[in-house]
Amino acid sequence: MQIQIKPVYWVLLTMITWGGAIIGFHLLRLDAYGINEAAARALLIGWSVADKIASPAVTMGIPDLRALVFIPLGIYWPGNILAAKVFTLLITFWAAVLLYKWHRNYAGDEAALIAAGLLLIAPLTVHQVDSLGAGPYLLLTFALGRWIDHAYRSKNRLFGGWFFLQLIVVMFAVSLHPIGLAYPLSLLWEWRKNPLDKRHQKYMYIGIVIAVIFILLVGMGWITQSWLGNPYTVFTDNILGVEPSEDFYIVIGALLGILMLVALAVDSLRLARDLIGRMLILGVAFGLFAADATWVFISLAALLYCGIPLLIRLNQSLGKTGFMGQRGIFFIVLFLVALLFMQGDKAYRIAVERNALSPVDKLILTLSTELEDVPEDENIFVMSEWPGRTMLAIKRPSMPLPPPYKDKETLFRNIKGATHLVFDPYEEDNKPLADQLFSVSGATKTISLQEGGAIIRIIDPQELLEEQTPSESTSPEPSTD
């Protein structure tokens, strides 16, 4: 008697095996370092809400909507960063499953299965999970958007639950990253080309526009997002999950970038007919203006889901017969890419075991070490350029840096009570702050100056207020002669 296992059990078994391998091979850090700043703020807000604590985290500004999904983690596993990473593992896997189901109808089972498999073992995927990056969440919203749209159309019910669920997912995606704008724009295009009727189309237009404007106004844009970085440098530095230390990896990253552009250019017309396909194309385009690891992750997904079907068709177009004739070139490339990804995973594991940190994390670690021997009841208050990451590491109150002020007296009054400042004095936005702080002798002390930035200790806050330019009361009185 042959026992047939339902597909859902194979999916669960694959998820457990893949997730267990990532955790078992020590590919995830267990401490508070390496976390994305936006994710750190969302995690702190989630923990604060779950524990009903008035935390200084609320002063960091409204985070992205991951804070809502992190609230259950705070209820059951408060303060546990590993729980958040395991949750992100699940998000990544289900995003890959939903994209597999979409890609199976778009390019066939073979291409869909291989694309999903390569995405799951890519070192950049491990890095996104380890840093709680926005990439897996964006991919999941892209896949959910298509499924929700189909469900809404099948119900054909105005202002039903699927309508509002679609708007919630739109707001979630837009709050994560500028790439999230690809979701509502693709949805608007879908309803323009394929409306149910004029009435549904009108209300969908209005709902999407209001949702996008609302989330941008409430979140005040993307406050932790860096803009106008060099896409080439960002892509080559992140595509293999860790910053390249050899020219070989830079060349490989550049080659993968060229292949992605070629795949999108060749298959763009066919891909643009599909909702998810448009999201990937627009996501890669929008990310050029906000290039970071999240954009590289979306670009990698676009490369795999667009490039693999093209490579299969290219191999078949040669007209050869037999397995090697039909799939020979494809499987050689597949073997090389899988080998490259596994080497990247190995390098990432070594980096975790060696506790290799980014320059900013090294700076925060220095501050954490400095505060280890300070009693918990002693007043320590840190103002940091990276308040979320700083608070996770030092487990003490942390707030963002003060905005630029026209004079140092106003600045000193607004940082009264702070004991430490952590920032990069070489950044253009921070130069006024650095100049004002360093212009006062004796009131501040530079604890550490590193590649990632500086740690400034406020020795005497009162002296900051007293150390001012001569006032009219101290100037010689005018002669009455």
Image: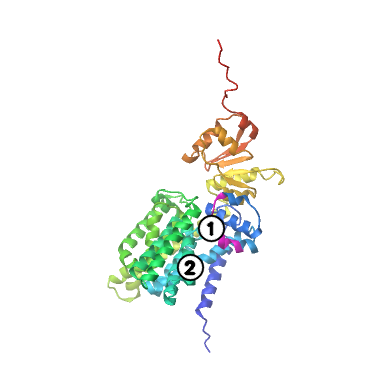
Which residue is at the front of the view, 435 or 347? 435
Label 1 vs label 2: CA separation? 27 Å
Q: Is residue 9 left or right of residue 416?
A: left
Magenta stretch, residue numbers = 60-72
Image spot of residue 416 (x, y percent) = 62, 38
> How many marks on residues?
2
Q: Quadrant of the C terminus?
A: top right
Q: What number is the disc on residue 132?
A: 1
- In this view, which residue lies farthest toward the top? 481
Q: Nearer the viewer, residue 465 or 224?
A: 465
Mark 1 neighbour density, 10 Å: few (under 14) some (14–19) many (20 or more): many
Tell me, for residue 164, which label it has, or none: 2
Q: Give the percent coordinates (x, y) of residue 469.
A: 56, 26
Q: Secondary structure at mark 2?
A: helix
Q: Residue at x 39, y 61 (%)?
A: 185
Instruction: Residue 30: give x, y in percent of width and height.
Output: 60, 57
Q: Amino acid type of disc 2? A: Phe
Tell me which numbered mark, 1 or 2, is placed earlier along the sequence: 1
Whether residue 419 sits left or right of residue 351 in the image: it is right
Q: Secondary structure at mark 1?
A: loop
How did the renderer colour the structure? rainbow
Q: Quadrant of residue 51?
A: bottom right
Query: Is residue 359 among what the camera can see?
Result: yes
Q: What is the residue that sits farthest to the bottom in this orientation? A: 1
